[in-house]
Image: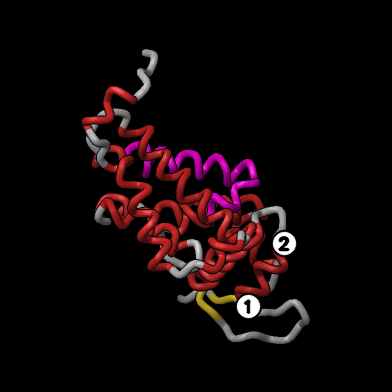
Amino acid sequence: MTNTDTGADDGRPVRRRDAVATRQSLLVAAQTLMAERGVAGVSTREVAAAAGVNQALVYRYFGSKDELFAEAARETATNSADFFHNTPLPEIAPALLDSTRGDEAHATVARYLLAANDDIVREILRSRIQDYFGTALAARLPAPDAALRAELLAALVSGIGFLRDRIRTGELAAVDDCTLHAYVRQMIAPLLEPDPADNGDRPSRAD
């Protein structure tokens, strides 16, 4: 038998919906609002309204606001694995920057880094950055310091995304994607494959 939910905040009936679809709608709404305003700036009422359901269903399915946003962050991050394994290396940073303005699964890295002002979300993202950049991406990069260079790429993407989409600095907010991507590819090239001739300029790392 299909489990369904009904009810709106103002008492009006809403269309019946499958419980799994309701739960997913709440997660999608939480992901979108979290990326736009962070966890602290979003209420469960707003999430429910965006999903088109009664606020009580947030607590029925997730128990609390913290659990809702933690699961939203975990789900989005989990969906990113294929992207980091399969995307051509020169296209990873441009694609992540594109995801700050869309709903792609790999938006975690670019969009959700900007929302990491909550301890629960921050810990989840720290783990995923390690998984995807420090492990998956680093495994595709040549030595030396592959994991460090992978995290530097994460820092570059999140910094550009923050200035463009949150601070909206003049040039970054106005630049077209084609021009931005061209510069970003040039910026990340040394991180993806360092020039052996530069080894003499690379600082040694302590053991």
Circles 1, 2 touching at the beta carbon (< 8 Å): no
User: Left or right: 136 with respect to 13?
Assistant: left
Start and end of the magenta stretch? 112-136
* Vertical relation: 17 (above or below) 99: below
Residue at x 22% of width, y 30% of height? 197
Residue marked by disc 1: 52
* Residue 104 numbered tag: none
Q: Picture coordinates of residue 5 (x, y %)?
A: 60, 76
**Magenta stretch containing residue 35, yes or no?**
no
Q: Picture coordinates of residue 103 (x, y %)?
A: 47, 67
Q: CA distance from mark 1 to mark 2?
A: 14 Å
Residue closest to the far right: 10
* Residue 5, visible in the rendered structure: yes
Answer few, some or many: residues within 10 Å of disc 2's Cα (few below 14, many 20 plus, some between 14 and 19).
Answer: some
Nearer to me, 46 or 108: 108
Q: How many marks?
A: 2
Q: Amino acid at mark 2?
A: Ser
At numbered mark 1, what does the secondary structure look like: helix, strand or loop? Answer: loop
Residue marked by disc 2: 43
* Vertical relation: 6 (above or below) 205: below
At numbered mark 2, what does the secondary structure look like: helix, strand or loop? Answer: loop
Nearer to me, 142 or 20: 142
Mark before the other along the chain sequence, 1 or 2? 2
